[in-house]
Image (tube, grey):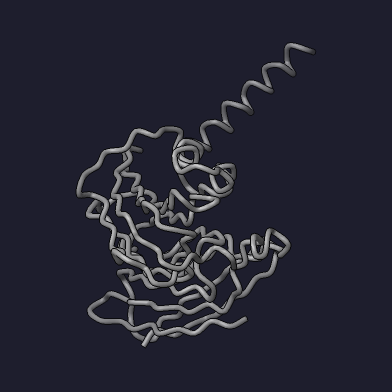
Amino acid sequence: MGIKSIAKVKNDIATVKLLVKHPMLSGTISGGKGKPKYITHLTVKHGGRVVYDMYPTSAISKNPYIKFAFKGAKKGDIITVQWKDNTGATEKKDIKLK
Amino acid sequence: MKRRKFLGLGFTSVAAIATLQTLGSASILSEHPKAFDATTGDAALKDAYGTTNVMKDDKAVLKLPDIAENGAAVPITVSTSLSNAKNMTIIIDENPRPLAVSWDLSEGTIPKFSTRIKMRKTSNVRLIVEDANGKLHEAVKQVKVTVGGCGG
């Protein structure tokens, strides 16, 4: 697990790129013998408000890449990335906007 | 006594329906989990939004390559020109489970997202955008896949 990020602010708009380490297994590998393991909900919060609300499935590629932008951000603000997968595993990370 | 119980029940269900309506399409996954298990694109659409009526216009914008060499990671960018859209969903018709990903949109978020998707084989990829009135807008693009990517 682990989340890599680039998060920059320009003119009030924050552009966030994330690379989330996760296998995103569908469970259909070699005739359905594998167990599914994929992220079902990923959110990014900025000051208590949800700025990104994603419901992925196993159709999102391994180690998901995510890019989005939101308004109303300042340099130095903290955003919180949080995900949950179908097995109940979770991860949370605070990222400082540059 | 029985009558009281009955009345009470009525009120709770009315309250429950009211809550659902104010939430609107919020969190398709928790309210319509069936949509994620649907095996055809139209069934996924029906389960998620309750209708398959879509408007093919320029409100939904889909950016995808024409040919994907590797179906395990196809770059995709979705966006909408609607400023108050509620939800965006990607449906890949030829995948075992066509509903690939769904986003709820909130104020302040610019409705333009990039990610990478898995495609089993050559398929139409659809972007569905739900506007503030619950109307659906659609963009469709066919992507040719040379190596499938749903074995993961």
Q: Work out whether residue B84 can be spotted.
A: yes
Q: Position of residue B3 (x, y in %)?
A: 73, 11
Q: Quick one: which residue is furthest to the front in this view?
A: B146
Q: Quick one: which residue is furthest to the right in this view?
A: B1
Quadrant in the picture for the C terminus of chain B:
bottom right
Place residue A6 in its image quadrant. Answer: bottom left
Quadrant in the picture for the N terminus of chain B:
top right
At 47% from the left and 57% from the top, the residue drawn is B101
Q: Position of residue A55 (x, y in %)?
A: 51, 58
Q: Position of residue A94 (x, y in %)?
A: 52, 81
Q: Position of residue B27 (x, y in %)?
A: 51, 50
At 45% from the left and 67% from the top, the residue drawn is B71
In the figure, is residue A29 to the left or right of B69? right
The one of B34 and B98 positioned closer to us in this rendering: B98
In the figure, is residue B86 to the left or right of A62? left
Count of labels shown? Answer: 0
The one of A7 and A36 positioned closer to us in this rendering: A36
Q: Work out whether residue B24 can be spotted.
A: no
Vertically, is B46 above or below A47?
above
Q: Quick one: which residue is furthest to the left in this view?
A: B58
The one of B121 and A57 positioned closer to us in this rendering: B121
At 28% from the left and 74% from the top, the residue drawn is A13
Place residue A78 in its image quadrant. Answer: bottom left
In the figure, is residue A1 to the left or right of B129? right
Place residue B38 in its image quadrant. Answer: top right
